[in-house]
Image (cartoon, rainbow, N blue to C red):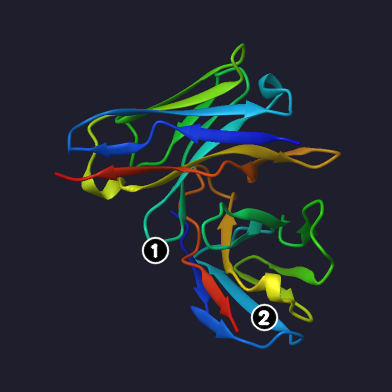
Amino acid sequence: EAQLVESGGGLVKPGGSLRLSCRTSGFTFSDHNMNWIRQAPGKGPEWVSYIDSKSIYIYYSESVKGRFTVSRDNAENALYLQLNSLRVEDTAVYYCARQFCSPSSCYMGWLDPWGQGTLVTVSS
Amino acid sequence: EIVLTQSPATLSVSPGERATLSCRASQSVSTSLAWYQQKPGQAPRLLIYDASNRAPGIPDRFTGTGSGTDFTLTISSLLPEDFAVYYCHQRRSWPPGPFGQGTRLEI
């Protein structure tokens, strides 16, 4: 069974930085495209970033472009998100999620499974 | 950016009844719409993809319909474990942006 475990969240001041990690197991990580999604308290989820299996295609939401950087280490089965120039509005639970694949196909944009999330709080 | 509007915000129903949730897109997404379920303290879980396909392991009491701008998630004969928040999301435009604001299904 696929498992994803995020870590690295915490309390940081505006303008600060954090590096989130997502450790995976139970599937061939190097075969799968991955995503980061965040969810602010009491709000719906917001897709944040995508990275394909070979780190060739990378995308960001407009709200984080230029401040966040996604990367992966296929040898370590790990996904990362570097968060720089953090703002109060970046406060959220950050989830990593695998691109969903049915038995016959994979679907860019559909997300399953997800990790349990790590909380990032940006506050002075 | 495509905006997804869900209605109602909260739906009160009883176990055994049918629930009908709506998601409207600000422009056509064809059938590129998914539904997710989120229970308290948990991550969202994919229920329906491409408007009408159930994800593996999802019971057939969950049915997705629609295309273009109007979509519906129907849950027939509600069980206690179905009470949760449901979100829609699209992948027609890339990057896909935010999910809908959610419908809370409560007893």
> Which residue carries the number 1 mark?
A42
Report the residue that reaches farthest toward the top.
A75
Whether residue A90 appears in this view of the structure is yes
Q: Secondary structure at mark 2?
A: strand
B39, above or below A69, in the image: below
Kindly identify the residue that appears in the image at 67 percent across and 80 percent down: B20
Q: Which mark is residue A66?
A: none
Q: Quadrant of residue A104?
A: top right
Question: What is the count of numbered marks?
Answer: 2
Whether residue B32 appears in this view of the structure is no
Percent across and percent down for residue B38 are 58, 61
Return the residue nearer the eye: B27 or B5.
Answer: B5
Q: Amino acid at mark 1?
A: Gly
Q: CA distance from mark 2 to mark 1?
A: 22 Å
Q: Which mark is residue B20?
A: 2
Q: Quadrant of residue B36?
A: bottom right
Kindly identify the residue that appears in the image at 45 percent across and 32 percent down: A7
Tell me whether the residue at label 2 lies in contact with that at label 1, contact meaning CB atoms closer than 8 angstroms. no
B74, above or below A116, in the image: below
Q: Secondary structure at mark 1?
A: loop
Mark 1, residues whose alpha carbon is within 10 Å: few (<14), some, or many (≥20)?
A: few
